[in-house]
Each structure stands twice: as structure tokens, then as C-alpha cells.
Image (cartoon, rainbow, N blue to C red):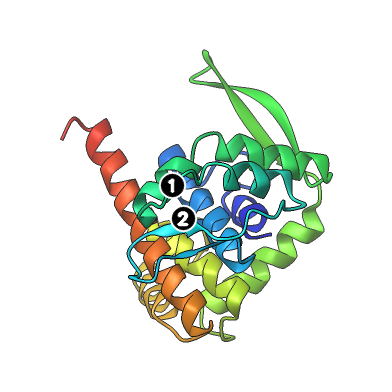
């Protein structure tokens, strides 16, 4: 699933820390969950194309997606949907990865004092293959598909592409921007992803402004 793949990309394989700030990680993960809900057919835009709404309440097999689906109690704009879905999303995605034997959560200290979590990737093969696959798309060695295109778009929305992949920041950012605007998904999904990308970016900017007191 997209949220799991995105979380793996955002974990530093060397030290188990996050490669982006918590707000960016949570907004990007919420965007990934929202894309999965749209792809599942459970959530779609209203006829006027402004708000996302629940259109099919059929339960989903994934506990993460089912819990997220329950938060759609009314139609909401993409930014609001991201803000609703980001609550506990990191812990929920990590719990799913841990249950699948992909990640192990351990304790660490920030500045030797404050308790924090360390995310140890135990399925190194899966993580490395994913990083290689998406990295080739970011660097222009292969074209994006619905999965890799969505992942790059979400990383670009929170300005994290250069934090996840080594290389020329300007070139990778340019490439990610092109991918985000590309035609690698069908029209309906493409429209949803564009709106979700904007919602993730707006939610991240709002969180940054709030934390800086602006």
C-alpha cells in the first residue's frame, strides 16, 4: 500500500530516524491514505469537484484504511481531509509495518535526554528495492506508473524528495515537479491526486506557519 511504501522511504535506513519533520511525514502519509481511499472507490469528489465525500461504506480489509474511512462523516475539501486523516496516521502505518515484519520500533533519546522512537527496517530487501525503484523514477531513468508517480508526488508536496534521495537537489526537484504534473494516471485519479497534492502542501504550510507563530 502507498502509506507503507511512503513510510519506508521516509525512514533513514542507517539510524532509524525520519528523513523529514513530523508534520511533513504525517501530511504526506495522510495524502497516501486518501489516495488509497479514492482508488478503492470508497471516497470520491462531489459532482462539483470541490469536496471529497464517502460514496461506498463497504468495509475495507485494511484496518488502517477502514479506520480512516470512518473519519469521512461529511464532505470535505482535500486539505481538510488531509488534516482529519493525519491524526495518529504515522503510528497506525508503523503498526501495520510492524505487524507485517517490515519495521521494528525501538527507543532512542533526543539530545541524550528526551525519549523518542527509532524505526529499524527489518525487511531490508523490500526497502532497498522500493528505494531503488522510486529513485530511478526521480532521476529520470524510468517513467512513473500510478504507484511510483503517487509516491514522488507526495514527497514533492512536502518538499522531501531531496531528503530521501541523493543527487542534485535542483534537478530532482524539477523532475519531481514534472512527474507531479504528468499523465501517468487516469483522468479521475489524476484529478484526485492533484487535489490531494495541493491539500497536503496547504496542510504542511499551515502547520509550519502555526509552529513558527505566523
Q: Position of residue 28 (x, y in %)?
A: 48, 52
* Location of residue 50 by image quarter: bottom left
Q: Quadrant of the C terminus?
A: top left
Which residue was labeled with disc 2?
Answer: 163
- Residue occupying the point 67% across, 46% down: 66
Say whether residue 99 is left or right of residue 58. right
Q: Is residue 94 visible?
A: yes
Say whether residue 98 is left or right of residue 16. right
Q: Position of residue 45 (x, y in %)?
A: 43, 66
Task: Tell me the element at label 1.
Answer: loop
Say whether residue 80 is left or right of residue 154. left
**Which numbered disc, 1 or 2, marks the residue that appears first in the sequence?**
1
Q: Is residue 11 above or below residue 6?
A: above
Q: Which mark is residue 74?
A: 1
Q: Is residue 49 above or below residue 77?
A: below
- Residue occupying the point 38% across, 66% down: 195
**Mark 1 in CB contact with mark 2 (< 8 angstroms):** no
User: How crowded is the residue under tag 1: few (<14 C-alpha within 10 Å), some, or many (20+)?
Assistant: few
Q: Position of residue 22 (x, y in %)?
A: 46, 38
Q: Which mark is residue 33?
A: none
User: How crowded is the residue under tag 2: few (<14 C-alpha within 10 Å), some, or many (20+)?
Assistant: some
Q: Is label 1 or label 2 in front?
A: 1
Q: Quadrant of the N terminus?
A: bottom right
Amino acid at each position: 500500500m502507498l502509506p507503507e511504501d511512503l513510510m519506508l522511504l521516509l525512514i533513514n535506513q542507517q539510524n532509524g530516524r525520519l528523513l523529514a519533520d513530523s508534520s511533513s511525514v504525517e501530511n504526506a502519509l495522510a495524502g497516501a491514505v486518501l489516495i488509497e481511499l479514492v482508488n478503492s472507490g470508497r471516497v470520491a469528489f462531489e459532482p462539483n469537484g470541490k469536496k471529497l465525500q464517502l460514496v461506498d461504506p463497504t468495509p475495507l480489509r485494511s484496518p488502517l484504511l477502514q479506520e480512516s474511512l470512518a473519519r469521512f462523516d461529511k464532505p470535505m475539501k482535500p486539505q481538510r481531509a488531509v488534516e482529519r486523516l493525519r491524526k495518529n496516521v504515522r503510528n497506525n502505518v508503523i503498526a501495520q509495518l510492524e505487524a507485517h515484519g517490515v519495521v521494528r520500533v525501538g527507543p532512542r533519546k533526543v539530545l541524550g535526554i528526551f525519549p523518542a522512537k527509532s524505526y529499524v527496517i527489518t525487511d531490508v530487501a523490500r526497502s532497498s528495492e522500493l528505494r531503488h525503484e522510486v529513485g530511478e523514477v526521480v532521476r529520470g531513468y524510468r517513467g512513473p506508473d500510478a504507484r511510483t508517480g503517487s509516491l514522488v508526488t507526495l514527497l514533492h508536496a512536502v518538499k522531501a524528495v531531496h531528503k530521501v534521495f541523493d543527487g542534485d537537489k535542483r534537478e530532482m526537484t524539477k523532475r519531481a515537479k514534472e512527474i507531479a504534473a504528468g499523465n501517468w494516471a487516469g483522468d479521475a485519479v489524476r484529478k484526485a491526486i492533484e487535489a490531494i497534492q495541493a491539500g497536503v502542501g496547504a496542510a504542511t504550510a499551515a502547520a509550519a506557519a502555526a509552529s513558527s507563530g505566523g
